Amino acid sequence: MSAPLMVLNQTQIKQFINEDAPKGDITSLAIFSNKTRFATAQIVAKEDIVVSGFVAVKEVLKNFRKIKLKITQNDGTFVKKGTLLAEVKGPVTDLLLVERTVLNFLQRLSGIATLTQRFVRRVHSVHGVHLKILDTRKTTPGLRELEKKAVRDGGGVNHRIGLSDQYLIKDNHIDAAGSITEAIIQVRAHQQRQKKKAKIEVEVRNSDEFLEALMFRTDIILLDNMSPRKVRDMVLIRKNKCLRQDWPLLEVSGGVTLKTLKEYCKTGVERISIGALTHSARAVDISMKIKS
């Protein structure tokens, strides 16, 4: 699922700028003191990437009204090494002050988008398989909306933005409630009282829990940390126990990598959620160089 993007507020942005220059950029102020020199800088991809982050860059540059931004490659675009992503024009002191904040957003978010696309392409390479690659809530505090947009820019799907969007009965809920049955009963009762339309998903760790969850026909069953062979067993059980129009979607989660992805694709599940899309994506190489 996805929600309207909540852009950064100006208080956050000022904090980001102040973090980098709490007393100003003393080097630039020393060199260009009492001068108003304008320059043009180019933002360039230094490797093959999927672009993401310009929605954040636009918000940052609202604090620098003399800087003009011209984007040449939009978020979600795959580009090759050496591609010009954008040009920025303005006072050289402003360009140098904002450079690192702009690049931090672009490198981090483009890294997430690029990694996501690798997973999505790997899925597409498996003949006859149509499943979704989803993210998780393992995001940087304060940047969740932007990081989840980066997943979408890479072709992935957002699982849920936060705890308010969907019921997800996890292992700790089950252990504290006493059983899957009790947890689902309480969630269904809450759903009816609150008249919520949110879907119900339940996490299972073994075949016994899977059979217990299957009896309630929740919308989604999450197969946690199961091997491809074990996942195939769960898919077969669903086929034997449920009518096609009545069966829950199956989602795999826990330690899926690019190396193991193809085996999971062949199991028959509909969804794979991968925390690494956001918590372990490598920042890609993007430069910002003044040309004049």
Image (spheres, rainbow, N blue to C red):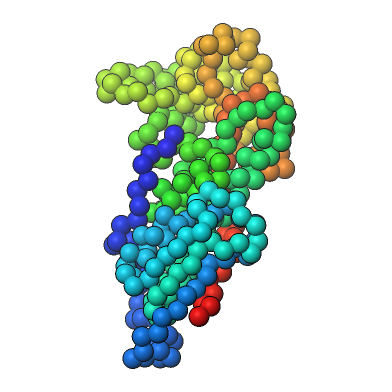
Where is residue 220 shown, x and y percent of the image? 50, 24
Where is residue 132 shown, x and y percent of the image? 57, 32
Where is residue 141 shown, x and y percent of the image? 41, 53
Q: Is residue 101 visible?
A: yes
Q: Can residue 20 be seen in this view?
A: no
Count of marks placed on residues: 0
> Of 169 and 242, which appears nearest the observer?
242
Where is residue 98 shown, x and y percent of the image? 42, 72
Tell me what residue is drawn at x 54 percent, y 14 percent: 247
104 in relation to 204, above or below:
below
106 in relation to 18, above or below:
above
> Of 214 and 113, which appears nearest the observer?
113
Tell me what residue is drawn at x 45 percent, y 69 percent: 88
Residue 60 falls in which quadrant of the image?
A: bottom left
Tell me what residue is drawn at x 34 percent, y 73 percent: 66
Point out the image quarter for the N terminus.
top left
167 in relation to 97, above or below:
above
Residue 46 falls in which quadrant of the image?
A: bottom right
222 in relation to 133, above or below:
above
